[in-house]
Amino acid sequence: MTLYVLTTFQQFALFVGVVIAVGCVAWSLVIAPRAERLVAESERAGLVRVERGVGSVGLLAASALVGGWLLRGIVQLMAFRDPFVPLGEDVSFLLFDVFWGTVWMGQGALVILLVPAFAFARPRVDGEGSGGSWWAAGVLTLAIVASLSLSSHAMGVESGRPLIVTADALHLLTAGSWIGSLALILAVGRRGGRPVYAAQLQSFSPVAVVSVTTLTVMGVVLAWTHLVTPSDLWTGTYGRVLSAKVVTACLVFALGFLNWRKGLPAVETEEGAADVHRRAAFEVSVAVGVLLLTAVLVHSPKP
């Protein structure tokens, strides 16, 4: 039971950290440039204040990823441990003789490098920043997403493995660009003032549409691959958890659609912005439940 809880917790921590890291990168490289074109020159200082906040959140996410990565190694060793073999032999075999160990060590280098990348990406108080550090953070985050897919259920398929691993990576990447970006805007986006907040939400909207579409398609591909028959959705543990995840995700989609249709047109008013913020906060809260179900799903035996 302890191992099950630890495994779920470390997977959840990794997913949350990656989703937030992806959201930070998507905000800086996609949303912020679009928002900058929507606000007046006098409002751009507010966008810089938001960027500092995004960089700080990214730094926290990267630091949490280091902890999640270490815990992942401990949990894997606990599951692999043979009490009749010296600990050193088990550690050596796990790290150097199996593919999981190679991926885990590479993942560790990536998450450690992500910490200074986000630290240098934050603009200084005078407004000067390092665009190169944001691109470096983006490359590192993309590689971390790929490393998670290389040690997921996607690696267990018998045919079409590169396609399924890519689908798994895109599934996580688009979840981050949607929910991670929205969570950031809610957390630090309002410190730039209402016009900057509205510009961020307007710039986020097309990102969300593309992300949700890709997320849905990749989710269908993965479900089709991992399930044997449709009845697996309700007859086995894996299928029941997947079904719960799909239902919860549909609720998140519905909340996002409602906010897009009803909230976005009124976001530039004080009352409209407050309504959007309230609905979006509920959307993100439900999405956390999806991540928790995903953490349970990834270490559940497939049908």
Image (cartoon, grey):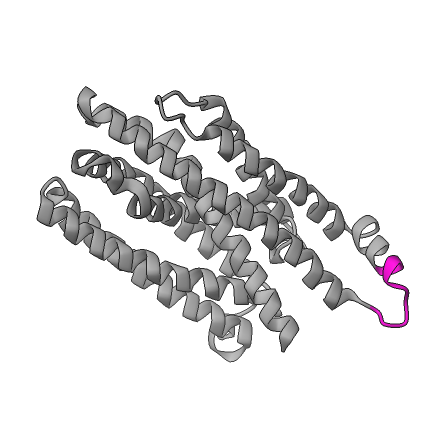
Figure quadrant of the C terminus: bottom right
Name the quadrant containing residue 147: top right
1 versus 167 height, above or below: below
Q: Residue at left 10%, top 45%?
A: 270
Residue 192 in the image: state x and y as whole percent: 24, 35
Left or right position of 208 against 134 = left
Q: Mark yes or no: residue 300 visible.
A: no
Front-most of residues 261 and 229: 261
Q: Residue at left 20%, top 36%?
A: 193
Q: Mark yes or no: residue 30 visible.
A: yes
Figure disc tally? 0
Name the quadrant containing residue 146: top right
Front-most of residues 114 and 243: 114
284 versus 296 height, above or below: above
Q: Residue at left 52%, top 47%?
A: 167
Residue 188 in the image: state x and y as whole percent: 31, 43
Residue 164 in the image: state x and y as whole percent: 57, 49
75 versus 182 height, above or below: below
Check if residue 84 falls in the magenta segment. Answer: yes
Residue 7 in the image: state x and y as whole percent: 61, 65
Check if residue 216 falls in the magenta segment. Answer: no
Left or right position of 272 against 202 = left
Figure quadrant of the N terminus: bottom right
Q: Residue at left 42%, top 43%?
A: 57
Q: Which residues are magenta?
A: 82-90
